[in-house]
Amino acid sequence: MKALLQEFKTFAVQGNVMDMAVGVVIGAAFGKIVASLVTNVIMPPIGILLGGVDFTDFFIPLSSTTAKTLAEAQAQGVPVIAYGLFLNTVIEFIIIAFAIFIIIGQLNRLKKPAAAVEASLCPFCKEPVAEDARRCPHCTSEIKA
């Protein structure tokens, strides 16, 4: 049991697990920011362009009870298909995916590609040999610098 706890402790404090935990927390906060952006900044102008429509009030009631808004339908306990909220969620997803695409693209630009070490060829057997080798590992011939 003690070995299991020690193994778990080692696993839990590894850099990858801690990095993932930080990423989840930042991702949750970023999700809230994007949700607010979509709900409070992007959707109102789109609603105005479409004639003053509020997307959150787009719903299909699944009973004969009438309600003018989604909040009213939910207060009455009417089952609904809230496709307006679904549209907001889809737009949030697209914005998050685009933001991640941009961030990953910039991070990839900052990464320097690993310098490819080109091996030279042995003058005798023509097999690849490291630059600093004094003998060929294939034919054991002595290589002059």
Image: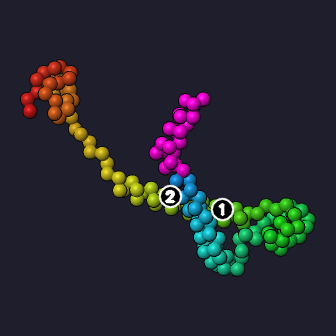
Q: How far from the left and from the top, in percent, is residue 90? A: 64, 61
Sooner in the amino-acid sequence: mark 1 or mark 2: 1
In magenta, the rendered stretch is 1-21
Q: What is the quadrant of the N terminus in the image? A: top right
Q: Is residue 31 magenta?
A: no
Q: Residue furthest front?
A: 2
Q: How far from the left and from the top, in percent, is residue 109? A: 36, 56
Which residue position holds label 2?
A: 100
Q: Identify the residue shown where x is 56% and y is 62%.
A: 30
Using the image as rendered, state which of residue 10 and residue 145 is in the foreground: 10
Q: Identify the residue shown where x is 78% and y is 66%.
A: 59
The chief SS type of the magenta part is helix
Q: How far from the left and from the top, in percent, is residue 31? A: 59, 61
Residue 133 sits in quarter:
top left
Q: Is residue 12 magenta?
A: yes
Q: How far from the left and from the top, in percent, is residue 114? A: 30, 45
Q: Say which amino acid is labelled 2.
A: Ile
Which residue position holds label 1?
A: 89
| Within-10-Å neighbours for mark 1: few <14, some 14–19, many 20+ | some
Kindly tell me whether residue 94 is visible in this rendering.
no
Using the image as rendered, state which of residue 92 and residue 34 is in the foreground: 34
